[in-house]
Amino acid sequence: MSQREAARQFGVSRDSVRKMLAFSVPPGYRRTAPVKRPKLDGFTEIIDGWLEGDREVHRKQRHTAKRVFERLRDEHGFTGGYTIIKDYMRERERRGREIFVPLAHPPGHAQADFGEAVVVIGGVEQKAHFFVMDLPHSDACFVRAYPAATAEAWVDGHVHAFAFFGRVPVSVLYDNDRCLVAKILADGTRQRATLFSGFLSHYLFRDRYGRPGKGNDKGNAEGLVGYSRRNFMVPVPRFVSWASFNAYLEEQCRKRQADVLRGQSETIGERLVRDLVVMSDLPPAPFDACDQATGRVSSQALVRYKTNDYSVPVAYGHRDVWIRGYVDEVVIGCGGELIARHPRCYDREDMVFDPVHYLPLIERKINALDQAAPLAEWNLPPEFATLRRLMEARMIKAGRREYVQVLRLLETFDIDDLHAAVKKALQLGAVGFDAVKHLALCHVEKRPPKLDLDVYPYLPRANVGTTSAASYMSLLSGDAA
């Protein structure tokens, strides 16, 4: 039948019959010209200006469609409806969304980043900054946690990651963290931070950087941050020390190498072999991951580093020193000599003392013994307090000075050896510096002590008289009764 007869037979228009003959399925509505919004014409430039300005403010204080409609109505006399404003902003946002190119990851390259999580270390809840390194070709990973994301933590994380894999990547992709990049120059090149520049010279790999503020340029590392937090740190990790926590994280990274990820037929460990073939050998010695600085010892035998004061022996007062700041300790030296070593403090404006540093000064200024701040929180075994009490009871002020001399034995002996010597001295009643020193040497050398108490004239002496036979006879005669 003809199209006209088919239209009459089925009760549809001839245009519909013509479309049925042209298409095997209904094509749907097709717009041939863009939608005309005459009431919006002339206002789109204003809307675009407001939305462009929103890029400079916090995302929670940007224009909504409702707020744009109200401002156009009140400030510019807009007579249209709210719906066309909402449709325009939705279409504009859709056009502005970024499109990504699927990437292929050749073997041997890596990405690195830092993340944050809450942990409990030594019974104290605190924020952990964890370093992650991902090999995108194999999805092998390494995670290590630190108290702070400092420059030395960045470098230390790399050193442990390279040791974990046993090789050095061809290149590593980063964001523009200040610990790595001191300045982005006008031509887009990066001026590296001092410590990171020396680190690159040691391992000789290529550093690459993403666009500022574009974390998706290193999406594998960003994804690893979230994966590590969800899988390695839930529930909140509780460990006695950072070392035990990092040992746990390293073990989790090793276990993950047995996984087969979606879209892959090989395990992570099997694909890691191809990464390792391309990567470089490790240098003969690892890089010394520390921040280097200089300082001067104050009149209180303190050296300032990163707002905190660390003690040094009083003999180095008012001298210039060098400082090495590691992630877990601070090392201080003078010339070619190492003079102090302290646990790293991440608080601000704090003082870190080693009481042994001040004992020579306290020995001379013995009246400061009870008020010395370095000794205030020194938790010595209780036998030391007993020793001091006995020394002061027998020798008064000289006993206090001799007690400080006993404490100065910690310059040579470990606290455990000196503690054992003090306990032995109290047991023998040999309360004196010479006796404690002798007993400490005997404890270390594992030989029996030989003490001669005749050299201690201040010790109380026991006079034992000779008993005569007549004394026993008095018991028999009943005189005793």
Image: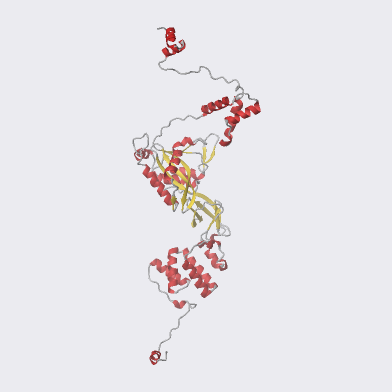
Relative to residue 307, is residue 279 drawn left or right?
Answer: left
Residue farthest toward the bottom in the current orientation of the protein:
477
The spot of residue 44 in percent (x, y) is 59, 25
Height in image: 20 above or below 119? above
**Quarter of the picture holding the N terminus:** top left
| Nearest to the observer: residue 127 or residue 446 | 127
The spot of residue 337 in percent (x, y) is 49, 57
The spot of residue 288 in percent (x, y) is 45, 49
Identify which residue is drawn at 52% across, 74% down.
393
Height in image: 381 above or below 68? below
Height in image: 131 above or below 100? below
* Quarter location, residue 261: top left
Residue 283 visible, this angle: no
Residue 155 visible, this angle: yes
**Quarter of the picture holding the C terminus:** bottom left
In this picture the colour scheme is: secondary structure
The spot of residue 352 in percent (x, y) is 53, 57
Relative to residue 197, is residue 70 drawn left or right?
Answer: right
